[in-house]
Image (tube, rainbow, N blue to C red):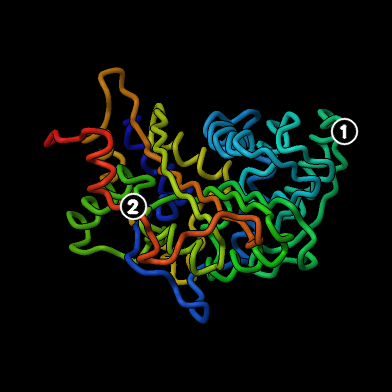
Amino acid sequence: MRRGANAIALCRRGLRSYCTENIDGLQSSKLRIFDRQLKRKQRDRAAWLMRPNDSLLDNVSENLLDRLEDCRKAFPTALCMGGSHEAVRRLLRGRGGIEKLIMMDSSSDMIKVCKDAQQDNPNENVETSFIVGDEEFLPIKESSLDLVISSLGLHWTNDLPGAMIQCRLALKPDGLFLAAILGGETLKELRIACTVAQMEREGGISPRMSPLAHVRDAGNLLTRAGFTLPGVDVDEYVVRYKSALELIEHLRAMGETNALLQRSNILKRDTAIATAAIYESMFAADDGTIPATFQVIYMTGWREHPSQQKAKCRGSATVSFQDIQKQFGGNSNT
C-alpha cells in the first residue's frame, strides 16, 4: 500500500516532468522547444524549495570553479547566471581574482533568495550585484566581462548556440567562458522505468522527453559559438534516494522539472504506479535506495585574442614522427 500511495503522489506531483531523452542534433534557433515563461515560474518555486548546501549542486559548482585554479590570469569582472549560481557564489572563495560579480537569473524570487544569502554570508572583497535577465537575451554590454560562468542553466535554452554566442560577445578579448550542462545520460534510470511502464500500460510512449545534448555535441557547440581553445569533459554523479518521490522532490527544488512546449499534462494513475514499481525492481539496491544518474558536461572556451596559442598550418612540420621515434630509440611495437 505504501508503494502505491507513493506512486499516486508521484503522479500528482508530475512524474511526467522528469523523463529525459537525448537528441542527435542541435535544435534550430527558429525552433522553440522549451516554455521559457514556465521555466521562470519553476525557478520561482525552486527558490523557496531550494535545499541548503545541496551536495549535487555543490559538487558540480566546485568542479566548475576548479578550472579557475588552472588559469594564471585574473578575471576582475564576472557574470554568473542561472542554474546553481548561488552555490557558485558561496564556493567561489577568492578563486579567479574576481572583484566584481554579477548574479543573473530569470526568476526574481531566485534573485531575492540570492540577495538574502549574500547578506548572511558575503564574499569578502567582491562587489556583488544582482539582475533579472534571460540567457536567451543577455542584458550585458558587449566586451564588458572577463569571465562568464553558467552552472546547470543553459540546457534549458531554446537556442543553445545562440546563447553561447551572446556569452562570447559579452566577454572581453581573452575572456573565459565556463559552463556546466546536463547531458543525455541524465536520469537514465527514470527514463527507462517510464518507457517500460508506458509500453506495458498504454502500448506506446507519450512525448514527455526533454532533449539534452550528447557529449560529442559539446565541442561542436563551442566551435559554432566562436570560442577558441575549446575544452570539454564529462562527469557522472549518482545520487541515491529513499524513493522515487524523494527524487521528484529534489528535481523540483533544483528547478529541473520539464518545460517542454509540447508536454503532456496527463499521466495515468496505473502508469505512475507501474513506473515507481519498475524503477524499484530494476534499480533498487539491497538497502532499498534507488540511484539516479546525473551526467554533467563541462565546457571551457575563450574569446579570441592574439596572445593565444594557435595551431600550425597543415604540412608546416619540420620533423617527422619517424625521426622522433629514431631519436628516442622507439622500436617497440607497443
Q: Going 85% across and 48% down the picture, which residue do you hit?
A: 129
In the rendered image, the residue lying farthest to the top is: 287
Task: Give the camera-side residue of 222 and 71.
Answer: 71
Q: Going 43% across and 66% down the picture, which residue do you hit?
A: 313
Answer with mark 2 or mark 1, whichever residue precedes in sequence: 1
Identify the amino acid type marked 1.
Asn
Neighbour tally class for label 1: few under 14, some 14-19, many 20 plus, Cα within 10 Å: few
Counting from the top left corner in percent of width and height, residue 162 is at 57, 71
Task: Give the camera-side residue of 104 and 74.
Answer: 74
Would residue 191 appear left or right of 143 to someone viewing this image?
A: left
Circle 1 SS class: loop
Q: Going 27% across and 24% down the picture, which residue do you hit?
A: 285
Identify the amino acid type marked 2.
Val
Name the residue tied to disc 1.
Answer: 125
Counting from the top left corner in percent of width and height, residue 318 is at 37, 56
Circle 2 SS class: loop
